[in-house]
Image (cartoon, rainbow, N blue to C red):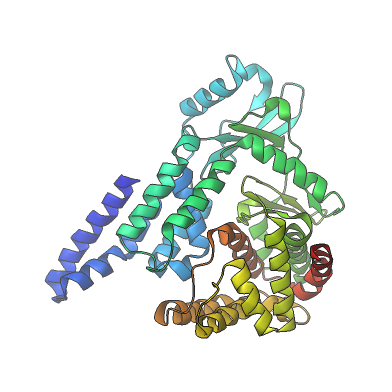
Amino acid sequence: MALAAGELALGGATEGVRRLIGSGTGAAGAAGSALLSAANARRLAARLARLRGGAMKLGQMMSLQGADLLPPEFAQALAQLRAQAAPMPPAQLHRVLGREYGKGWQQRFAQFDEQPIAAASIGQVHRARAADGRELALKIQYPGVAISIRSDVGNLAAALQLLKLLPHEVDVRAIAAEAARQLGQEADYLAEAAFLERFGRLVRDEPQLAVPRVHRDLSTPRILAMDYMAGEPLESLAADGVPQATRDAIGTLLERTMFRELFEFGVMQTDPNFANYLWQPATGRLVLLDFGSSVQFAPGFLANYARITRAVIDGDRDAVRRLAVAIGYAAAGDPPALLDATAEVILLVCEPLRHRGRYDFGASDLPSRARSLGIDLGIRQGLLRTPPPETLFLHRKLVGSFLTLAHIKARVDARALVLPLLEAALRDAR
């Protein structure tokens, strides 16, 4: 990670000198613009892709909210990390398999495809057939990831602070600590196996959702064995010719599942990466994959979230301001202007919930409006607090889900979906 920061700084210094010679601008301005150059952005993204692990994962997470936190060049470059990772060489892969399964691991499989079908920040996925004929997907962790997560995330956070790539009011250390905690959980594949089994039970009543079964006899803390599930990439729904009714049905399924996670299950898979879903056109089913980034919410937190959601739908600004303090978006004693600004942002970003009828996510300009308002109120006027670290992964799911529905051009009646779940959650909270 230190090398990545060094490369970035060196590239910035070189370009800064070139701009100084060419334009005669001040040293500080040239150095700042150089560090924010597109070339440096690509250099950082490429280095994070090679680093994998915690540094790459944090970069992926930042990319989802990069339009709000980072300069455009960095947001665009980091977005590459959501679908980019360098796979393990075969020799390294064999060493991992031998360490986890022991000598003669090949005898466990009738077939093992050494070419990964997916490669991400913490591990890669291989298709295999067990000796008894079970068709499997094996999620295999990169060596050393589990022990390097905290240092990788810390080093990346330090580099971002050093290079002043984030607004000064962002509590980078608190965000990094929460990211390291959650990413540490993601590196425990037996913990993910438990979430996978749990979600399988939770959505059993939803025939349009499928969750792969865990195969415990072939799972270890560093290898997760699951059913192999066939399907089309979720992104294929964005292609020309896909009926609008199909887009709307899958979008509704995604949105209803997210609301159930938050207000009914109390546990949420917080990584809405496209690669974590498959669509089965023949049946219309949606396959849910990758439960490493699952979060169990405290009952008190969920109760307050249900209350503020109800207040948003009702347009009750006083209640939104009061509950924003309870959740941590604002603090007791904050000036009225900050409370008003916080309520204004919350009401805006919850626009789909306040809308009556189907909300056209694909046609919405809400992300750009929310970004402009956030920059104006938060950065120019200093009227917004950084959200509490415990909301980091929840926000990733909320923001990512909106972007997913926008990408597939879904129209969804979010208000109608959330109201019954919300009322049940509020009754339980009394």
> Which residue is drawn at the image coordinates 73% and 71% (left, top)?
307
> Which of the two residues, 60 or 306, is positioned nearer the viewer here?
306
> Which residue is drawn at the image coordinates 62% and 19% (left, top)?
106
Q: Which of the 4 image quadrants contains residue 78?
A: bottom left
Can you give x and y, in whole percent of width and height, for residue 201 in the image?
82, 45
Q: Is residue 152 visible?
A: yes
Q: Quadrant of the C terminus?
A: bottom right
Q: Is residue 229 visible?
A: no
Q: Which of the 4 image quadrants contains residue 252?
A: bottom right
| Outermost residue toward the top in this view | 103
> Which of the two residues, 31 or 94, is positioned nearer the viewer here?
31
- Left or right, residue 327 beside residue 251: left
> Which of the two residues, 167 or 203, is positioned nearer the viewer here?
167
Say above or below: 19 vs 153.
below
> Which residue is drawn at the image coordinates 53% and 62% (left, top)?
64
> Which of the two residues, 186 or 170, is positioned nearer the viewer here?
170
> Which residue is drawn at the image coordinates 49% and 77% (left, top)?
374
Can you give x and y, in whole percent of width and height, for residue 326 in the image?
63, 69
Say above or below: 181 vs 220.
below
Can you give x and y, in whole percent of width and height, for residue 395 in the image?
59, 63
Say above or below: 285 vs 35.
above
Can you give x and y, in whole percent of width and height, for residue 73 in the image?
39, 66
Q: How many marks?
A: 0
